[in-house]
Amino acid sequence: MAQQTANALAEQVYLRVKDEIFDFHLLPSDRFTETALAERYGVSRTPVRDALYRLKREGYLEVGFRSGWSVCPFDFVRFDELYDLRILIEINAIERLCQLDAEPSLAALKKTWLVTAAERETDSRHIAELDEAFHCALVEAAGNREVLRVHVELTEKIRIIRRLDFLKEQRVDATYEEHGKLLRLILRRKSTEASILLRSHITQSKSEVRKITLHMLHEARASMQRPAAKTRTR
């Protein structure tokens, strides 16, 4: 029972730290100690240490002998590789969807993305979550569970980049337009056109990655600390 409790606490700390990274509360190169984190979360150092080493194995954190823990700097080469893999997976999914005998089940996506400008969401975090869900739903609808598993893991690894992207109003508008067009092409079985659009859509996001500066990250942190914008009523 004690071990189960410890594991549950470590899982909670793991998720909280990861959320702080994704929400820009912890920025690349930010430093902290196990003791400070344990005090902030109201737990002992043991579950904190277990969680931090798990995040280290996943590439989010690094630890120094005397300097404590820090958030890993952005690895732009790795992000490029992840985006390239994402393109391959999602184009394959689109090709499979366009080859299905029955119309793919995309009703939920149509309800979210085929809306008027007045009905669009405005909160950047929510839009980023909807964007993730859109692309994951396409891969899931293609029917390969192992590919979906890889795609879900990949999606988490680039989450912080995508959330940063949606702080730009023009990217929000472009995403709605492109997602809507992509859905229509898939439903019409226009595999080639849909694949070209998808590649362009993801490549645009990929090209923004190397433009990220520390100043932009600090602005994102300040933005996330402000009250969220109200969601438009549908």
Image (spheres, grey):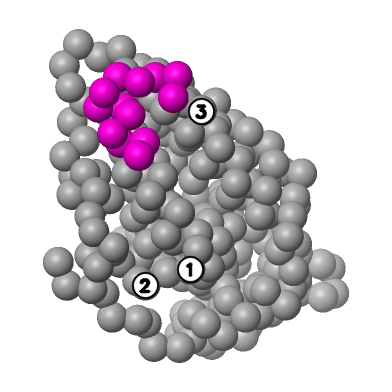
Residue 107 appears in which quarter of the rendering?
top left
Residue plotted at (43% across, 52% down): 175
Q: Which residues are magenta?
A: 181-193
Q: Residue at x 50, y 50 (%)?
A: 156
Tag 2 secondary structure: loop
Provide the residue designation for mark 2. Answer: 123
Figure quadrant of the C terminus:
bottom left
Give neighbour class at mark 1: few <14, some 14-19, many 20+ (Cα, 10 Å): few
Nearer to me, 3 or 84: 84
Residue kind at label 1, given as amino acid type: Glu
Q: Which residue is mark 3?
A: 196
Residue 129 appears in the rendering: yes
Q: Tag on residue 67?
A: none
Q: Is residue 70 visible?
A: no
Task: Judge whether 70 appears above or below 127 on screen.
Answer: below
Q: Earlier in the sequence, mark 1 or mark 2?
A: 2
Q: Spatial distance from mark 1 to mark 2, Cα to Cα?
A: 10 Å
